[in-house]
Image (cartoon, rainbow, N blue to C red):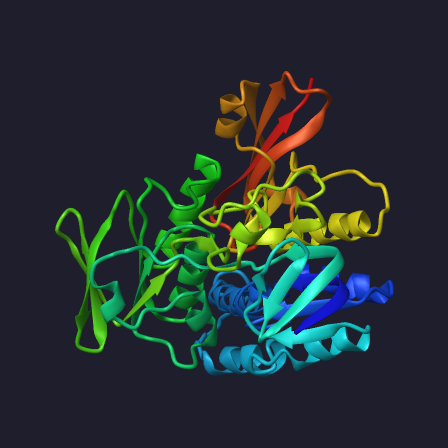
Amino acid sequence: MAEKVDVVVLGMGVGGEEVANSLAEQGLTVVGIESNLVGGECPYFGCIPTKMMVRADDMLAEGRRIPGFAGDSTVKPDWKPVARRIRDVATDNWDDRVAVERFEGKGGHFVRGAGKLAGPGKVSVNGTTYEASRAIVISTGTSPAVPPIPGLDRVKYWTNREAVKVEQLPESLVILGGGAIGVELSQVFARFGVKVSVIEGMNRVLAMEEPEASAVLGEVLHRDGIELFLNARAMSVEPRGEGVTVMLADGRAIIADQLLVATGRRANLVDIGLETVGLDPSARLLEPNDHLRVGERLWAIGDVTASGGFTHVAIYHAGIVVDDILGKPGPGADYRAKPRVTFTDPEVGATGLTEEQAKKKGLNVRTGIQSTGPATMASSRWSRTRTAACSSVPRPWVRGAATPSASSSSPSSCRSLLTSCAT
């Protein structure tokens, strides 16, 4: 059975939802297809619930700092109110009814199922083929990437999804991966009394950021009681009673009650019919043009693209695609100052290129250090700013930054890293 519509949005994560809602508001006939939760990872397993977790661990840390500054304090962690707020306030117990009704209230037609491209201008789902006269938007998002480590399939490991839904904390936790997800969750659980170990294959945590930021954060994590295994490779995983043992390449064994896999994300592009529209079905990511087109009347946005990876980028993509579908002229995507933040304590904020990335692009980079005393800040900590000025670019603009912010929970020296490129 075929049904003619204006637009089909394949994947209703944060970017797809934005496209679908916006085009439905403009009076187009829009079909939104999603097999999981409308809104995607961010509101249910990422941005929103994890920031509730981070806020809670920050409050514990602040309470523990009162002695010597503002009196006395006794802090007793309790995970139950955190889990309750995530379940009842943030996620509606992982129910997307409100998001679905919002889309349908704008005139959209929602289909729960695993949609698949079925040729140019066509998407099939649940036995129905939708023929889109104006656009198909691929917005299928990502899932946790699970490495092929021997024995991993024999243990009940967590990804970020299980970590967010946990009601009772383990006594000990080993985390595979020292990237943004790994370090954020390591600090959360450590401050709630869990003995945490992090295994990272690079020589520092947050290896994609500036090395100075990694050094500051590594020191803070150590102070929180987190054990870091750097330059380490997990060779195998073995069940150990109700717990787990991770064997490292150097022979060390890391034992914990629970394992969390935080080794990145993979785009959901397998078996969605890319070959039917002339795209490579084995592609890890899609590479659209600056208006996010990947074919005739075919767009791709968010995490499935080579320049995605963040919620705010998916929303940015959505705006460009909506205008393009509606025939409104406008600039294409520009990623020269793409921002990002890792919500540890202190936070590590960044925008654009790191110094190393700028040098690889052939830019002439100069660096400097600027320190800011505590009298000018809202805390008793110092901030150190590292600036890199780069030449050989068309005009002055901020090229990149990595900033551990000077919050009241920062270590004694908090370095802010700013990379700016100017002619």
Percent x, y for residue 54? 52, 64
- Tell me how many marks there are: 0
Residue 301 higher or lower than 113, as above or below: above
Percent x, y for residue 196? 32, 63
On screen, residue 223 versus residue 59, left or right, reads left
Residue 25 higher or lower than 360, as above or below: below
Percent x, y for residue 339? 63, 44
Asked if residue 294 can be seen in this view, the reply is yes
Residue nearer the viewer, 329 or 357: 329
Percent x, y for residue 183? 42, 55
Question: Residue at image x 15%, y 53%?
Answer: 252
Question: Residue at image x 48%, y 64%?
Answer: 61
| Extreme-front residue of the structure | 1
Looking at the figure, which quarter contains the N terminus? bottom right
**Rendering quarter of residue 130:** bottom right
Residue 113 higher or lower than 265, as above or below: below
Asked if residue 406 can be seen in this view, the reply is no
Looking at the figure, which quarter contains the C terminus? top right
Residue nearer the viewer, 143 or 250: 143
